[in-house]
Image (cartoon, grey):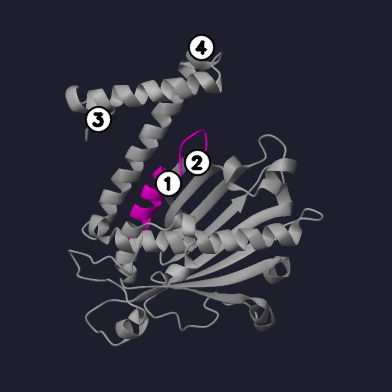
Amino acid sequence: MRQKEIDLAQANRVVLPCSVQEYQVGQLYSVAEASKNETGGGEGIEVLKNEPYEKDGEKGQYTHKIYHLKSKVPGFVRLIAPEGSLVFHEKAWNAYPYCRTIVTNEYMKDDFFIKIETWHKPDLGTLENVHGLDPNTWKTVEIVHIDIADRSQVEPADYKADEDPALFQSAKTKRGPLGPNWKKELANNPDCPQMCAYKLVTIKFKWWGLQSKVENFIQKQEKRIFTNFHRQLFCWIDKWIDLTMEDIRRMEAQEKRIFTNFHRQLFCWIDKWIDLTMEDIRRMEDETQKELETLRNQGQVRGTSAASDE
């Protein structure tokens, strides 16, 4: 049975003042925005595939992404990890309201994976064992309640006032700010939708001497990611509440087009940068910043434009 492969499992529950239907758009919009914020300096997210799938009666959207994460792992891992080993493949099957994501690493092969299984339900996080684990396995799973309005659950380095649900109020929906008792108030407010994202995170990391330390680090980071992401999602609600799924797919296609064009240029410009040092790059960055400021104030609009609909 699949439960025998579980090394460390944690069930995260994230309650939100939106409907399951609204969340589908908000999640995809926020993923696209967060991906842009995490990409740069040779690290970040590369989208290989984003396409519909249908298998064994299940239909949804399949994505395959590559994460380049050298600076985003603990120092003790960077010290011992071989060059190129901190590249991770994420494959996701989004058959909303159920989603399954599996992260693997080509260097560690079968000794590493992260599996995230998510059910989105129209409730306040009160359902037990929504993923249908056997009773003995379920007893070993730690349940973590994430409160998007609780600043104490946010790392100091992650805090942003404009992404704080305790301060934010939506101009379009009038939802927020979320006070200390917002979940109780939500339960008694028939005019505001409610939902919970039930996220079961299963981790396998087989490396002698590091297994427990790394597994616990990853679970902590997953909780951190879920917390920050859903705080952003709520505070960005005015940006996505009026979007349709067609709008989201156009955004995703545009992001992939920009990313593809960038790497084609990077390769074709190799003779221009292959002999540069980091000192050269830093000087160029300073010069480019000044040049961009001048162009922004005086120059014409340049760069990639929207693709033709034809």
Q: Residue at the location (24% across, 23% down)?
A: 294
- Mark 3 and mark 1 lie on one chain; the one further toward the N terminus is 1
Residue bearing the label numbered 2: 44
State the CA–CA distance, disc 2 to disc 1: 7 Å
- Mark 3 and mark 2 lie on one chain; the one further toward the N terminus is 2
Say which of 269 and 136 sits in front.
269
- Give the residue type at disc 3: Ser
In the image as oriented, which residue stretches furthest toward the right? Answer: 208
State the CA–CA distance, disc 3 to disc 1: 20 Å
Residue bearing the label numbered 3: 305
In the image as oriented, which residue stretches furthest toward the bottom? Answer: 188
State the CA–CA distance, disc 1 to disc 4: 29 Å
State the CA–CA distance, disc 3 to disc 2: 23 Å
The answer to whether residue 56 is visible is no
Judged from the image, the secondary structure of the residue bearing numbered disc 3 is: loop
- Mark 1 and mark 4 lie on one chain; the one further toward the N terminus is 1
**Highlighted magenta segment, given as a residue range:** 26-47
State the CA–CA distance, disc 3 to disc 4: 27 Å
In-image side of 121 versus 297 (left or right): right
x then y, percent, for residue 162: 31, 57
Residue 19 is inside the magenta segment:
no
- Give the residue type at disc 2: Gly
Q: Residue at the location (66% across, 82% down)?
A: 139
Check contact, mark 2 vs mark 1: CB within 8 A. Answer: yes
